[in-house]
């Protein structure tokens, strides 16, 4: 009797899994419920063998702000990958990882950097998101890389899904994300809110200065790359201007001095306008603005490269 | 290897396919258990297998030494305790002591950074070190006390020490319980296998459905450097954490017990619905029972227990609770957590408030609620990233500031609903036991088996589709 129950449990489980995998209820907004796609995206980002002509390195503003596909419309001979991470630091470790993605046989190897004051905060040396996915167990990596459809089918649902659908409960902020294989996260949040995080940012950053050792590493890395014939470009990614001003002031990140040192190290600075972009949360650009920025950056790159 | 990983599924499938073939033969059985357990542990970091081997060999040899040379029993016991506590001091507490000694030296005007001089390898906390060193020590202490005869077979000993279901997060099994079980060929009945499945599935449900889903909100709250001053917000978060840690840890224990049942062995119950207790003293007879009985038998009673009057008994209890706090983590937060539990137990002893409250109509509910408030507040110190954060959160809990509007602003409807749904599931389960309900009262015998089967399948499907984003078990870090 009991062995029938164990067998019955497994049979019912398999039937239940298949039924729910195929007929899974969708979230009120499927673009909010993207845990499996996010894992697939970052596992691919941290565990890939492919090499590129141009690699972009930045923090979350680079991650959500630069679309390689849009850039490749103007830079057609370059294969571009966005290697930016949330809470990403601009230190030696990330420079090494970035260089590993660069095709050493490329006729025009380019590294595009999107530094911000936040990327030079001491705690950013931890590169927490990069490490989280770099150190995923190999079985998970294998599964996401080889059978991503399984991960998609079995993507978790929100515990309150049925109540939300039934009572039409909306989240306070709804972040929608589309994960592009070339390393860009197309993002938007409803409602847009530039201001609410500004005060919190000021409080959070108070007394926190940029780490000069990290900036030294950044300059040394730039010099090493340029000496090996790699074109190193950089620009300040735009955001909500009062926020950028607050970050730079509080952390004592002097953009002009930084630019001068970068150019001395052999890098080429791209002048990208800081106004005229829309942010959804006071820090990250909306999808339309990200496309606009990608076009502008690509045009500026083309002027340098061609 | 994590229980909640694909690789463990493969490991378990291969292991349990081979187990019936190997288990009739004693020596191959020991070797198989040791090899599988070492593979299970070494999957995380093979280098630390040498630590288990070294610590185990020391205790194995000490056990044999005590049996062969009873006149040198103290020497062998000393060596065993020194070795085990020494490895804990090096791998778990060296950073803590270096930081605190460095702080004291700085106060004395000497600017010495001791922590930076500790090799990086030593600062990696080997998974489960607190569990297996305590398990290993209990072996030699029991031999010293004449309560256990040492095993002469090293594979027998290591099968006991490293048995994979409980190696990294308990329960801490006594040698006197497990060594005899390992010695004989195990037999499992259909009922054992069903009970094992029940424990494994419920353990996974606690971990992935409840703990992992709550972990997301708790981590977000504690890692946000700007704390909300809203009182209700922190009561919600602490309720979430209370169920997160309970379901995470007891879930692991349930899985361990279920796997042991499939092997044909019995592990002790490690959690007995602690949140339905009505006093702190009762709470500690229900929470992490294998650890609290370990501390009772190997710390509290050797210190004198309650044999020398109320004052000495309280002092012994305080020492035990503070050491227990320190066992959980190398930080002042954990010591304070232990101290708060000791303080609560002392107040209980002298005021006898639980007994008085219980005598009132509905007193059981009130006593249980008061106990939960105490436990929730102490959990703040257990979970907070810093002492300053803990103090700020406790301040918020009792500020009664912000009201429901503040709660909605800080959490929003969806997060609150997610936490509410998960906590309600966990709390209802505990309430079931609080009320002493039994499924036999609700389900006629005839339909019980198909309902149980369908419920089990539904829980597994829910584990897959409603699993949370967490991964590692909390108690791995202890």
Image (spheres, grey):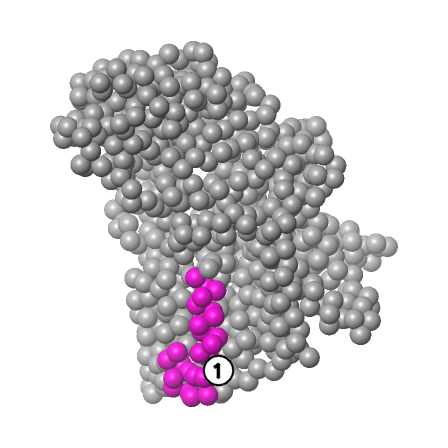
Q: Residue at 45% x, 63% y: name it.
A: B8
Residue A43: x and y, percent? Answer: 40, 45
- Numbered circles on residues, count: 1
Residue B239 visible in image: no
What main secondary structure does the magenta stretch of the protein show? helix
Quadrant for residue A297, please give it. top left
Quadrant for residue A244, please give it. top left
Residue B437: x and y, percent? Answer: 78, 64
Specify whether A127 is left or right of B348. left
Work out whether residue A33 or residue A266 is closer to the camera in this orientation and state it: A33
**Bounds of the magenta segment:** B7-32
Q: Is B255 located above or below residue B185 in the figure?
A: above
Residue A245: x and y, percent? Answer: 41, 14
Q: Residue at 37% x, 19% y: name it.
A: A295
B256 falls in the magenta region: no
The residue that disc 1 covers is B20
């Amino acid at each position: 009797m009991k062995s029938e129950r164990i067998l019955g449990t497994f049979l019912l489980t398999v039937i239940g899994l298949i039924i729910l995998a195929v007929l899974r209820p969708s979230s009120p907004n499927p673009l909010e419920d993207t845990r499996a796609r996010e894992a697939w995206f970052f596992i691919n980002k941290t565990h890939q063998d492919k090499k590129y002509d141009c690699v972009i390195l930045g923090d979350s503003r680079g991650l959500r702000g630069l679309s390689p596909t849009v850039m490749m419309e103007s830079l057609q001979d370059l294969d571009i990958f966005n290697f930016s991470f949330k809470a990403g630091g601009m230190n030696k470790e990330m420079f090494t990882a970035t260089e590993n993605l660069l095709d050493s046989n490329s006729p025009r190897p380019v590294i595009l950097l999107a530094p911000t004051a936040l990327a030079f905060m001491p705690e950013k040396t931890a590169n927490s998101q990069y490490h989280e996915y770099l150190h995923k167990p190999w079985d998970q990596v294998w599964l996401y890389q080889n059978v991503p459809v399984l991960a998609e089918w079995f993507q978790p649902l929100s515990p309150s899904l049925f109540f939300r659908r039934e009572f039409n409960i909306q989240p306070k902020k709804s972040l929608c994300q589309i994960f592009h294989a070339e390393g860009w996260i197309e993002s938007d949040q409803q409602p847009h809110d530039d201001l609410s995080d500004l005060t919190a940012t000021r409080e959070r950053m108070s007394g926190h200065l940029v780490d000069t050792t990290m900036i030294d590493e950044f300059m040394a890395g730039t010099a090493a790359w340029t000496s090996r014939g790699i074109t190193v470009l950089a620009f300040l990614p735009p955001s909500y201007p009062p926020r950028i001003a607050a970050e730079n002031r509080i952390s004592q990140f002097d953009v002009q001095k930084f630019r001068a040192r970068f150019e001395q190290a052999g890098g080429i600075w791209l002048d990208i306008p800081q106004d005229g972009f829309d942010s959804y949360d006071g820090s990250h650009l909306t999808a339309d603005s990200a496309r606009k920025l990608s076009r502008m950056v690509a045009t500026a790159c083309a002027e340098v490269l061609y | 290897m994590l229980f909640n990983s694909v690789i463990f599924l493969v490991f378990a499938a291969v292991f349990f396919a081979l187990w019936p073939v190997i288990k009739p033969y004693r020596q191959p059985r020991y070797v198989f258990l040791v090899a599988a357990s070492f593979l299970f542990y070494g999957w995380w970091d093979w280098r630390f297998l040498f630590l288990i081997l070294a610590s185990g060999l020391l205790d194995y040899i000490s056990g044999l030494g005590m049996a062969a040379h009873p006149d040198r029993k103290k020497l062998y016991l000393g060596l065993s305790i020194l070795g085990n506590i020494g490895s804990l001091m090096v791998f778990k507490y060296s950073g803590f002591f270096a930081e605190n000694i460095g702080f004291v030296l700085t106060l004395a005007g000497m600017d010495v950074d001791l922590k930076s001089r500790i090799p990086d390898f030593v600062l990696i906390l080997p998974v489960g070190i607190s569990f297996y060193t305590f398990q290993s020590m209990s072996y030699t202490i029991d031999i010293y006390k004449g309560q256990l005869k040492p095993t002469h077979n090293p594979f027998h000993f290591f099968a006991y020490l490293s048995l994979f279901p409980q190696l990294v997060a308990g329960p801490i099994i006594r040698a006197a319980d497990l060594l005899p079980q390992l010695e004989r060929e195990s037999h499992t009945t259909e009922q054992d296998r069903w009970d094992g499945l029940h424990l494994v599935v419920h353990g996974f449900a606690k971990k992935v459905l409840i703990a992992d889903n709550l972990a997301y909100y708790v981590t977000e709250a504690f890692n946000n450097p700007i704390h909300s001053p809203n009182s209700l917000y922190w009561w919600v978060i602490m309720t979430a954490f209370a169920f997160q840690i309970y379901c995470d840890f007891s879930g692991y224990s349930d899985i361990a017990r279920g796997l042991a049942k499939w092997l044909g062995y019995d592990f002790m119950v490690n959690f007995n619905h602690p949140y339905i207790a009505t006093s702190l003293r009762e709470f500690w007879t229900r929470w992490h029972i294998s650890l609290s009985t370990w501390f009772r038998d190997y710390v509290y009673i050797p210190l004198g227990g309650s044999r020398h009057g109320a004052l000495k008994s309280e002092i012994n209890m305080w020492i035990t609770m503070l050491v227990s706090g320190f066992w959980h983590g190398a930080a002042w937060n954990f010591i304070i957590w232990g101290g708060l539990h000791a303080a609560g137990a002392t107040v209980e002893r002298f005021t006898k408030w639980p007994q008085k409250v219980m005598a009132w109509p509905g007193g059981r509910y009130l006593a249980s609620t008061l106990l939960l408030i105490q436990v929730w507040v102490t959990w703040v110190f257990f979970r907070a990233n810093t002492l300053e954060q803990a103090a700020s959160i406790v301040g918020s809990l009792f500020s009664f500031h912000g009201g429901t509007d503040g709660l909605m602003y800080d959490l929003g409807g969806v997060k609150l609903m997610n936490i509410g749904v998960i906590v309600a599931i966990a709390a209802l389960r505990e309430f079931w036991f609080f009320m002493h309900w039994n499924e036999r009262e609700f389900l006629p015998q005839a339909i019980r088996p198909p309902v149980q089967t369908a419920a089990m399948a539904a829980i597994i499907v829910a584990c897959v589709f409603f699993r949370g984003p967490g991964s590692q078990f909390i108690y791995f870090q202890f």
